[in-house]
Image (spheres, helix red, strand yellow):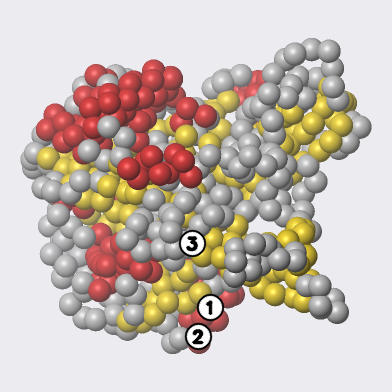
Amino acid sequence: MSSSPHSRPIKRLLVANRGEIAVRILHAARELPSPIETFALYTTDDRSHCDLGRPRHTLQIPSASFYLDISYLIELAKTHSIDAVHPGYGFLSESAEFAYRMWHEAGSIVIGPGWENLARTGDKLQAKQLAQKCGVPVLEAMSRPTGNLDEARAFARQVGFPVMIKAVDGGGGRGIRLVREEGELENSLQRAIGESPSRSVFVEKAAVDGFHHVEVQIIGDGTGRVRHLWERDCSAQRRFQKVVECAPALVNDRGLVGRVIESALRMATEVCYRSLGTFEFLVSEQAGEFYFLEVNPRLQVEHTITESISGIDLVQTQLLLAQGYTLRELGLGVEVSANHPPPNAFSIQLRLCAEDPSNGFSLSIGKVTAFTVPTGHGIRVDTNVDVSGPGLVVGSNFDNLLAKIIVTAPTWEATVRKVQRVLADSKIDGVKTNIGLLRGIVAHRDFMTGKVDTQWLGLNLETLIQKGERISKSLQASNGPSRSSQQAMSQTVLPASNLLFRKGDAWSITLEPLSEDGLQSDQVAHHLRLSRVLRNEFPHSLAAEIEYTTPTSQGAMPYRMQLETTTTAASALVSSSHRRGDPTNPQHIILPLSGKLMEMLVSEGQDVVENQVLAFIKQMKMELEVRSPRSGRVKWVHVMEDEDEDVAEGMLLVELEASNGNVEVRGRL
């Protein structure tokens, strides 16, 4: 059977995603001329997208991992007679297996290009072969995946450094490492393998200095007819994670851009591309050359700026194409010149994330207590933050994207000025964000003049962070601290105790009833012991199973305790059973970020040397190393209770034996 099932109307749509993209898809489905019954998924601690997207039905899943459980999602589709699934981006959006099995086992189509195109274009090596077949320039690369260091080293020596190590099936910056010298090769290879879902990587010659990251938005109806919706420039990126995107590209040579677009069209036509696809390239205006990178066969995070400059709702177009409409029927059959930019439209998207750029972009865990981004002409905000409801708690299970701020104006200069004003008027409390860095980027002269290549942000990072901090301090001085920010500051102070709630913690509780004359009567002793911590967002909320003993009881009685605040909007604290490190203690190696602890590599009594890797932490898509800042013998080490354990910035990771030195010890990446 073809990977493009027969045309039929969609009656029941499951949005197999969360966050702002789930809200975006739900809204688009509700606006279609023919009504679609919508279903959304959520976990107990993450359902704000349901509150804002207002689906017809909500389905609770046991945990975050079930967004990736194909068999589970197939059973949901069968149970609820769902005939279409929109995967958004991330999760299973590029899984050919998901699209194939959902159709053959549940009779449901997955919105996208179909499993055949997913298999051919989602695999980076197969996509490079397609480009070569179509006469599109590619960078020299290994012809097959490898995990062997000797093979990777031999290829790197052959083509010369720098090289790029890439996961065959990576996405969103995951599984990519730039290697500028041979000494970095082994560690980079292992980290890229660790971030690849299939643990398959390859090596290719790197083109980094002076190159723009340009991606072409392609749309096709599966008949061989395709068209472009111009291009986007995603060069403002850090560690291959996009931060700011714009459309059209910041490349003055439209003839060069036209050749890039024509290359994308040839490739899409060759495979009779269906639905949305993004064809990515590296483009050097100075050298007048470009190279194909990869295909993202799905909706992109930055689809918003293409919508802004083209006036086309890409999500609705996806849904209509999946129901059998052709480009001609949708009014998209007219070819547009690749050499000319869209008329009088420039658009910028900024990714507002819960992270601390001044501390290595460490994840900021907590509850968003205030969120204000101005609206108005040319301003769009895609978000799942809803402070009017239960609010949004940022944890380590999901991506830390809070919102996408999209600004559009007739000229590039006007668009940048509007972005600067919007960021100046935005306020977010409860968690740390990268808004200062965003302010620094858009205020820099290089950004205004379009002189931003793929290395620009990394090379100027400290300058941009400092510039953003100066702008933020100036704004705060002129406006004064908000009441909500003062509340958040007072509520996010770390507890005085060196130990957060954990299983087995116990308290003796003395109740002292007062007599009518106000004097205390006999004291009554009770005992409370935590047998299981279910959720710790104290003081906002606390859920736990407890054993409660009274003087008159025969033994400990089991209870489930649920605490919900009604008088405060405190930030959430990460659920933790961990000792907090003492920054003044030179023997403490303290975790510098929050995330998931993947592996501890040392044990008590072991000798460690300076710069030795102690543990691996995962933040969203990336695996990060925590290294020892000095040598010593391990006196105490954190013992993992669970696989993929949630950990908080500031916890004690390792304690070394005392020495005569007074060197301050902190964990570092």
The answer to whether 226 appears left or right of 430 in the picture is left
Judging depth in this view, the residue of 663 and 53 nearest the camera is: 663
Asked if one can make out residue 105 in the rendered structure from this viewpoint, the answer is yes
Q: Position of residue 494 (x, y in %)?
A: 58, 40
Q: Is residue 496 above or below residue 26?
A: above
Q: Position of residue 218 (x, y in %)?
A: 28, 52
Q: Residue at x 86, y 79 (%)?
A: 554
Disc with the residue nearer the chain's start (1 vs 3): 1
Q: Which mark is residue 78?
A: 2
Amino acid of disc 3: Thr
Disc with the residue nearer the chain's start (3 vs 2): 2
The answer to whether 469 appears left or right of 153 in the picture is left
Q: CA distance from mark 3 to mark 2?
A: 39 Å
Provide the secondary structure element on which disc 3 rests: loop
Q: CA distance from mark 1 to mark 3?
A: 38 Å
Q: Position of residue 660 (x, y in %)?
A: 83, 13
Q: Quadrant of residue 238?
A: top left
Instruction: For the residues labelled 1 and 2, say whether their Cβ atoms are less than 8 Å apart.
Output: yes
Q: Which mark is residue 74?
A: 1
Q: Which mark is residue 565?
A: 3
